[in-house]
Structures are given as C-alpha cells and as structure tokens.
Image: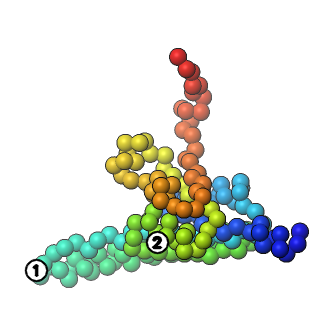
C-alpha cells in the first residue's frame, strides 16, 4: 500500500466513555469490530459539574467548601478513569489522545468536540433505557444521534438473559 493510500485509510474515531460498563463495552466493541491499523483514537470523557447551591448568609462559605470538594472528587475520579483507558490504549499500541472536559452537558460536549476534531466516527455506549425513562432522564447517546454531524455507532447493552430465548411471533 502506498503512503498516499495509507493516508486515505486512516480514520479519526472519537470514543465517548463515562466510567460505566456501557463505556467499557463501547471501547471494547470498537477494538474488536471496527478498529483498523492507522486509526487515530480520541477517548473523551465529559462530565457535568453540579451547580453551586444558591445561598446567602453566614453559611455561604460552608456550601462553597462542600461544593468545591465534590467537584475536586469528581475531577480526580475522572482522571483516574482516563488513566485506565490510557493504559489500555498503550497496551494495544493505538495512536490516541485523551480528552477530559468538565462543565457542560456530556452530549453537547461530545458533539462539539467531534466537530472541532473533525472525526470520521463517534462510538458510544447506551444504557438501554425504555422510551419513557429516556424521555424523563435524557440520554447522551440519543442526544448525539440527533445533534452530531459525524456518523455514530451506538453500542447497545447486552441482551438480558430472559430476552435471548424469546421468539417474535406475528399474529
């Protein structure tokens, strides 16, 4: 393969992770099913910082201290998680970049970063929520599907054991 053809084959892939089994499944599914030599992988974790509780009076400083500690704990947990993904990327000899972004809703961050990085594909997991729960709770993967200009691969959760043997029968 010529250097020119090799350049064309390289893809930039963003894998959105959140520290859950669903993010791990998305990473593993990408590696097993669609990873190609020459791919450039961006592992992205976006997390929201909870709003600072509004308060006035003598307890404002106490609220700020507690909130600040919570934000620091979230950030440290996120960094630790990303170190795990970084090690996995190293072990697989990937060309990779790790991105950790705090503050905005995750779906928004993922779509923005995908546009900024000009990725060829976004890979994300999903929790497998019912339509009603997804409507109430929101869904990062659903947001990405509806707002991204990049192609998306949504890796579903594994089938539940009681659903594997069910057969669909039309009546």
Determine which residue is flagged by label 2.
Answer: 77
Determine which residue is flagged by label 1.
Answer: 57
> Which of the 4 image quarters holds residue 5?
bottom right
- What secondary structure is found at the residue carrying circle 2? helix
Front residue of 75/136: it is 136
Q: Residue at x 72, y 61 (%)?
A: 35
Quadrant assignment for the N terminus: bottom right
Does residue 35 appear in the picture of this structure? yes
Q: Residue furthest right?
A: 1
Q: Which is in the foreground here, disc 2 or disc 1? A: 1
| Residue 164 drawn at (x, y percent) | 59, 33
> Which of the 4 image quarters holds residue 133?
top left
Q: Residue furthest left?
A: 57
| Residue 155 drawn at (x, y percent) | 58, 51
Dot 2, crowdedness within 10 Å: few (<14), some or many (≥20)? Answer: few
Front residue of 33/3: it is 3
Does residue 90 appear in the picture of this structure? no
- What secondary structure is found at the residue carrying circle 1? loop
Side (left or right) of 64 relative to 94? left
Q: Residue at x 47, y 55 (%)?
A: 146
Q: Is residue 166 above or below residue 76?
A: above
| Residue 162 drawn at (x, y percent) | 54, 32
Q: Is residue 14 above or below residue 168?
A: below
Cα–Cα gap, marks 2 and 1: 32 Å
Which one is earlier in the sequence, the residue at label 2 or at label 1? Answer: 1
| Residue 26 drawn at (x, y percent) | 60, 57
Q: Residue at x 71, y 54 (%)?
A: 33
Q: Is residue 67 above or below residue 134?
A: below
Dots 2, 1 in contact, CB < 8 A: no
């Amino acid at each position: 393969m010529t250097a020119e053809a090799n350049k064309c084959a390289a893809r930039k892939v963003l894998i959105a992770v959140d520290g859950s089994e669903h993010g791990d499944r998305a990473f593993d599914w990408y590696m097993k099913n669609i990873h190609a030599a020459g791919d450039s992988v961006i592992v992205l974790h976006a997390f929201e910082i909870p709003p600072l509780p509004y308060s006035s009076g003598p307890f404002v400083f106490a609220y700020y201290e507690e909130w600040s500690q919570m934000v620091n704990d979230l950030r440290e947990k996120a960094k630790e998680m990303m170190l795990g993904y970084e090690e996995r990327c190293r072990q697989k000899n990937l060309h990779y970049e790790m991105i950790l972004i705090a503050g905005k809703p995750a779906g928004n961050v993922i779509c923005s970063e995908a546009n900024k990085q000009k990725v060829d594909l976004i890979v994300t997991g999903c929790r497998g929520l019912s339509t009603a729960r997804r409507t109430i709770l929101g869904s990062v993967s659903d947001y990405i599907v509806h707002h991204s200009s990049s192609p998306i691969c949504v890796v579903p959760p594994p089938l539940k054991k009681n659903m594997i043997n069910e057969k669909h029968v039309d009546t």
